[in-house]
Image: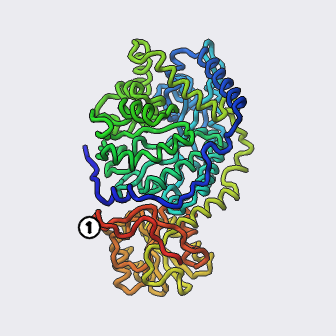
Amino acid sequence: MSTSPRSQHALNVSRRAFVGSGLAVAAGAGLATGPSTAQAAGKDRASWINATMAKMTTEQLVGQLFVMHVYGSDADVADQRNVPDYGVAKPSEVVEKYRLGGVIYFAWAGNLPTAVQCAKLSNGLQKASLTPRRREAQVPLTISTDQETGIVVRLPAEATLFPGAMSLGAGRDTQLTTDTYAITGTELRALGINVDYAPDADVNVNPANPVIGVRSFSSNPQLVADHVAAGVAGLQSAKVSACAKHFPGHGDTDVDSHTGFPVITHTRQEWEEIDAPPFRAAIDMGIDSIMTAHLAVPALDASGDPATLSKPILTGVLRDELGYDGVVVTDSLGMAGVREKYGDAEVAVKAIEAGVDVLLNSPAADVQWNAVLNAVRTGRISKRRLETSVRRILGMKYDRGLHESPYVDVDKVSSVIGAADHQARAQQAGDRAVTLLVDDAGLVPLPQKTAYVTGAGDSSVAALAAGLTAAGITTTSQGTGTSPTARQISQAVVASARASATIVLTNNVNAAQKSLITTLIDAGRKVIVVAVRNPYDINQLPGVGSYLATYSSTPVAMKGVARVLAGTIPAAGRLPVDIPAADDPTKTLYPYGAGLDR
């Protein structure tokens, strides 16, 4: 078990008031109704939920609590990878066997080879769930995925790819954030996906965080809160349920809950100041669901249980104190952080007892499904408790229109996915994020029209080189990956000899990347460093005279850098985090809000 260190630096970040974010989205935008209309809608909602539940068997009620992955891209074609997990081969058979409430799509499960195939899969799975069966209700599925944008994406290559949360935080434009998630939601819904496990509501106050980082909008709680609210508004306006994660906050840890068990050492006051504001903002915006974190917060629950299994945290804090009555979903139950203390059967039951409604991505489907069913039959989980969760789940499905429109029009997919106006808005996000922190060398914009591009990420290096070439700059390039070899470094020195500037991309800079940069500088090259992931790399590079941060290696981010270097657009981004000194984390090297105007 590891405990993440608290630093005075992190406390200073959390307590600095954010000024001027100007959330451009009104809470409940587009949802205002008169009292009589709202009452009628509420009656229709309740009537549908009641009528549906009246026909549901206990097995169906239990099945609604489970969202599982399935292997394959066709609901009715056998995929043998399903057999070890579920005992059946067809994705449709998995849905039918467990009476699933939902499925989750992953690229590694083969669900998203193309946009059209994904839409067909969604329709096939919905048909499996809605096919009439004796004595059972017909209930539409939630079909979900993790399309956070940035480094966590699931959609096929045709989809619009935005640069990610921290890029949006650097851009300081909440309307752009709303549009990002509205467009993402529109494309998701065209594929039949109606739940997005986004936005990330974590406040990344720990630069060493191995799992959140640029998935977070900022280290500033208010900035995160503003953009989380904007993201929720965007997704849900597209009839896609948003899901703020990871409650009660995963931003101050140096342990990855996929592989270990983090412990957050915030005091209760620190939690209120740092972690709580984004979740409060999401709740105020009417978010459909909130995802739990597989970590311990002793200030909220001294038992040592992960938050996913903690009644004091999920019922006591989230439901009773914050007033949240929407759907609570676990993070993946296959992660190490939730499996260290209890077996899989007990994990599933304890999660429901704690206040969870949805059990996500079970690593032991038969074990956990039967454990919950047996807990209901023996009275450990009361029928009333079970029905409370099912009512929330069905209410979410109703609110996003699944009771009326569970299927999608496959013929319209190609006109929606990656549409030109979507791509243009994504480019605006990439442009606005670029942050110029250092330019003592006077290289931004490039004073001459020749450049050499190298460093981390072959595709990113190629994209930046193409952007510079398109801007009229004679450019050559060669990627090195994140761990350049001595031979690659020597080649870079030779290849950059005739360029007026050498641009090096870094990705969480390490010793090999530092060696590339220092060798180029020692050889007399004029070096511009571009950090394409976490912006903290500069504290490891004291000799660098020009440094930009993009928070993303996506094509739109690289094109944005090219435009800044060419002088086509200004560097408009501002640091959404503090960058501490490498040798003293209590000392701020570059403060939140920093950025040069060029």
- On the image, the x and y values in percent for residue 431 come to 58, 67
Q: Bin the neighbour count of mark 1 within 10 Å (Cα to Cα): few under 14, some 14-19, many 20 and up.
A: few
Quarter occupied by the N terminus = top left
- Identity of the residue drawn at 61% across and 38% down: 194
- Identity of the residue drawn at 58% across and 79% down: 567
Q: Amino acid at mark 1?
A: Asp
Looking at the rendered structure, the number of numbered marks drawn on it comes to 1
- On the image, the x and y values in percent for residue 503 come to 46, 76
Pick whichever, 572 or 63, lies toward us.
572
Quarter holding residue 292: top left
- Identity of the residue drawn at 66% across and 46% down: 186
- Identity of the residue drawn at 57% across and 69% down: 560
Residue beneath label 1, please? Answer: 583
Residue 479 visible at all: no
Residue 421 visible at all: yes
Pick whichever, 417 or 284, lies toward us.
284
Up-down: is 497 above or below 350?
Answer: below
Q: Residue furthest front?
A: 35
Name the secondary structure under disc 1. loop
Tell me: 484 left or right of 128. Answer: left
Pick whichever, 448 or 290, lies toward us.
290
Up-down: is 470 above or below 127?
Answer: below
